[in-house]
Image (cartoon, rainbow, N blue to C red):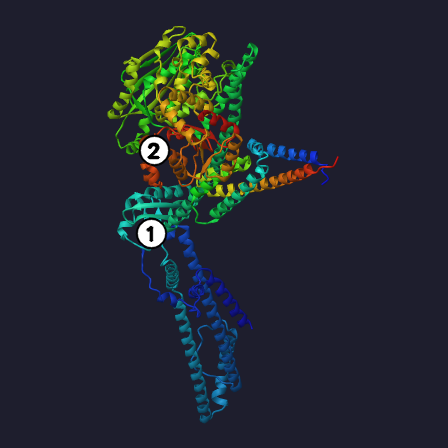
Amino acid sequence: MVCEMETDQIEEMDVEVLSSMWPEDVGTEADKQFNVEKPAGDLDTLKEVTIETRTIADMTRLPNLLNSTHQGSSQLTNLVKQWEYMQDNAVRLLKEELKNLDRQREEAEAKELKIIEEYKFESNEPENVPVLDETSDLFRRFRQKKRDALVDSKKIEIYEEFDTVAYWKQKALSLEKMLEASTERERRLMEKLSESLKTMESQSAPVQELTQNLKRAEGFLHFILQNAPIVMGHQDKDLRYLFIYNKYPSLREQDILGKTDVEIFHGGGVKESEDFKREVLEKGKASKREITFTTDLFGSKTFLIYVEPVYNKAGEKIGINYMGMEVTDQVVKREKMAKLREDNAVRKAMESELNKTIHITEETMRAKQMLATMSHEIRSPLSGVVGMAEILSTTKLDKEQRQLLNVMISSGDLVLQLINDILDLSKVESGVMRLEATKFRPREVVKHVLQTAAASLKKSLTLEGNIADDVPIEVVGDVLRIRQILTNLISNAIKFTHEGNVGIKLQVISEPSFVRDNALNADTEEHEQNGLTETSVWICCDVWDTGIGIPENALPCLFKKYMQASADHARKYGGTGLGLAICKQLVELMGGQLTVTSRVNEGSTFTFILPYKVGRSDDYSDDQDEFSDMADQQSEPDDTAEGYFQFKPLLGSIYSNGGPGISNDFLPHKVMLTSPIKLINGFVADPSNNTGQSEMLQLENGGYMDESKLETSSGHCPESAHQYENGNGRCFSKESESCSSSQASSEGGTLEMESELTVSSHREEEKAEIEVKETSKPNILLVEDNKINIMVAKSMMKQLGHTMDIANNGVEAITAINSSSYDLVLMDVCMPVLDGLKATRLIRSYEETGNWNAAIEAGVDISTSENEQVCMRPTNRLPIIAMTANTLAESSEECYANGMDSFISKPVTLQKLRECLQQYLH
Amino acid sequence: MLGLGVDRLQADINRLLASLFHQGVLDEQFLQLQQLQDETSPNFVYDVINIYFDESEKLLRNLRLLLMDREFSDYKKIGLHLNQLVGSSSSIGARRVRNVCVAFRSASELSNRPGCLRGLEVVEHEYHYLKNMMHELFQLEQQRILAAGVRYPM
């Protein structure tokens, strides 16, 4: 029982001790991991694994290191302890064995004693005392007894007892046998003893055991680390390598050991890692860091580095342990992910931003459209009100009524002006505003603007025009807009100047810097488009005054919409506050720049720089002829090149300065084709059109209308007078649409004049013709594709007492015009097959050439039989009235440019139709 | 039916028209239309409006077909249709239909498909509203004429 318990304890102890350090059955664990069915169970698995030695270690110093550091000594202590336990175990086992042997011997001796006692035998055999006999007192006592007994019994032996030989012989034999058995036992015991001594000897070699264990540990480490892409090492205090393990060794032992990182590698990251290690060494705290190396040795790689400080037994730092793992791929992946995420976020943000912008743009567009539509809607009834008021002013009124009416008209004009400004602005902003390139003479434009301004001048100001000699006689640009800008600036200047001068100065400048910045992208495009046939010239235009000036703090918001320098000014001087904003936008639209410099009480100068193209000389000469004819008639040959104008107040000179009689001799056709609105407006508003007498009258009346003037100007058309009146510093030649009805009527006026003066014969012939054909009922053609519009228009015509023919598109219109003669054509602009603009162009071309070639070229089918008839007919201008649906999309300029005479904006009303018929049918 | 409600009917008609004007569904052009109606064409307004509805119905159907097509890109055609619709709407004074058509058209000019779809919805909505209102108006008108036609022997 005791024995069993003891062995059990020993076994338990064994397990405890052995399992603590390295798992003996590494194989099983590994196999469990790799799901191998049969566990190998011992170290043989490791023996099969081929282990390459990639470890480079300084063998002389490593043992020192192991002895001197905590890590090293603790490992050794573990091994020693383990060995001691094993020795203890062996000793216990031996002791057990000894006990057993003792017991056996005791038994044997007891037996011997029994035998001796039995036979009372006194032997003289040599004493065989067992070596390990000291403990058995019993035996010794017994021997002493025996000896004592021996002395007494000798005498008895010889003389008295058993004196027979046979008996003694037998006795000796049996004793000999027993002796033999005893010696045999002795020998076996001796053998056993030596054997156990031998095993003790073999067990007593701890180094072997330790080596084995160490080997196992190393094998295990290798097994684990064999394919791991890691580098391990130990560096001393000076960061010199003492030990390194590397899966991919590319350096030899002597290249690494005893050297520092910096000595081994060169390139990015080495210094950083060195610093990091040093930091760890200093702080005494293990830490990790990712470092990217770019060395010649292994290229660009990122390592995750773990460094821990190593202490010796005295607690001093003696170096670091270092472990690195290559994580280049992971880092690349991680960076990619981060980048993707970032891109994603950016894209999302952009998307939402874009959506927002789209939304805003849509809203803005809608709002602008709304504004434009509204303005348009307001304008139509308002022009009715103003028109009616003007008609009313031609009737007999007393003074008070007239004054009231004048206030009414001027207020109405102001509102109209505001609306026009808004329309203009929304046009520019929505990008619908199209610029026209027409040839014009800057000197004339300046002169006309000044003339117009002088005509309506109510203050004693001197207006000056100064044009440098190098400004070309003729340039190409959108004269209408330029005129608008000039007029606006001049009227502004006059408004804010109470005495002194107001003037315009033109000069050629070199290309300004803000253009040069954009030169690469913008200019090349432009040049490509123009094919480099024309050269550009930059003209700087100053509009200066000696007025009240603008305080510096008001300059920034000067060009903003609805802003005036101050509320006081707004009240004092009135105005919409839109003028400068429009000017600026127009200038920028044309690729220029509008700036202002000003000093309070000294005056302001508005400067705008614009690019113009200079036309080629042959074109120029053509025009020159035309104009020189005119100049001859005027007997003012210097006019085109004159560089200085002055308009002084209250002097008769202004009226002689302007070229008299221009418009009377001017053919309206040509006016239409070049730049209709400007010239018409310019000339109608030009005081020089009228006789000096009427001018004086006007001045006397303070700019108000006079009946005598009405009579002297184009007679029966009262609205042309309105145009004149309109010119009073507010609406010189702003926008054709604004005064559509009145302007059309003024055209009618000149047309009328023309027919009376020059081509009256045609007219009469035609009239005669018509009278022969029909009983003076005018022939009207409506070209319109919309059924509803046709119905409405027809019904209106019926109410007005007319009938009309219908054509559904441009082609039908041409066919209809070809087959019968019309006095008036109402032409829808937007139509399928052939739109109104094209159709009008074709009709005009027919009127000029007398044939339909252009139309046939355009694909319109015209029967030849009627062609002959057409050729015989004299060609004169057929009034074509455009019907436009929308002011933004179908610009009036476009209508005029395509040869239309006037336009009615849709929806057509009785009023508009009646006015139109009154103008064009006589 | 007894011809006693003429005044009331006329008042209803006026009220309806006033509200339509107030809402901006109709504008002055509709009055122009009414002015054009005389003894020679007693049903002028009714006829014109009927034709307008016929035409517009067709146009709207076409527009919807065009826009429903997935691979559609013919904004020009949409523009043409809309021009028609704008023209005829402004001719009869259907101001709100006209205005939403204009917005729709600007969306089509920008080739803005979602805008177009929205525009179409709005136009259809306005169109149907107008149609209902007109229907009501004509019914009142009819009743009024009937009532006005009743004569009692003196």
Residue A603: x, y in percent?
41, 12
| Neighbours of disc 2 within 10 Å: few (<14), some (14-19), many (20+) | many
Which residue does the image show at 49% across and 65% down from the upper left? Answer: A15
Dot 2 and dot 1 within a common chain: yes
- Residue A245 appears in the rendering: yes
Amino acid identity at mark 1: Phe
Mark pair 2, 1: CA separation: 105 Å
Residue at the limit of the structure toward the left, as seen here = A618
Name the chain under label 2. Answer: A
On residue A846, which mark appears? 2
- A635 and A285: which is toward the camera: A635
B48 w.r.t. A918: above or below: below
Residue at the limit of the structure toward the right, as seen here = B154
Which residue does the image show at 38% across and 6% down from the upper left? Answer: A652
Which residue does the image show at 43% across and 54% down from the upper left? Answer: A74
Q: Secondary structure at mark 1?
A: strand
| Neighbours of disc 1 within 10 Å: few (<14), some (14-19), many (20+) | many
Residue A713: x, y in percent?
43, 15
Residue A535: x, y in percent?
27, 26
Image quarter in which the C terminus of chain A is found: top left
Name the chain under label 1. Answer: A
On residue A243, which mark appears? 1
Amino acid identity at mark 2: Tyr
- A147 and B133: which is toward the camera: B133
- Residue A428 appears in the rendering: no
Residue A747: x, y in percent?
42, 22
A485 w.r.t. A810: above or below: above
A471 w.r.t. A323: above or below: above
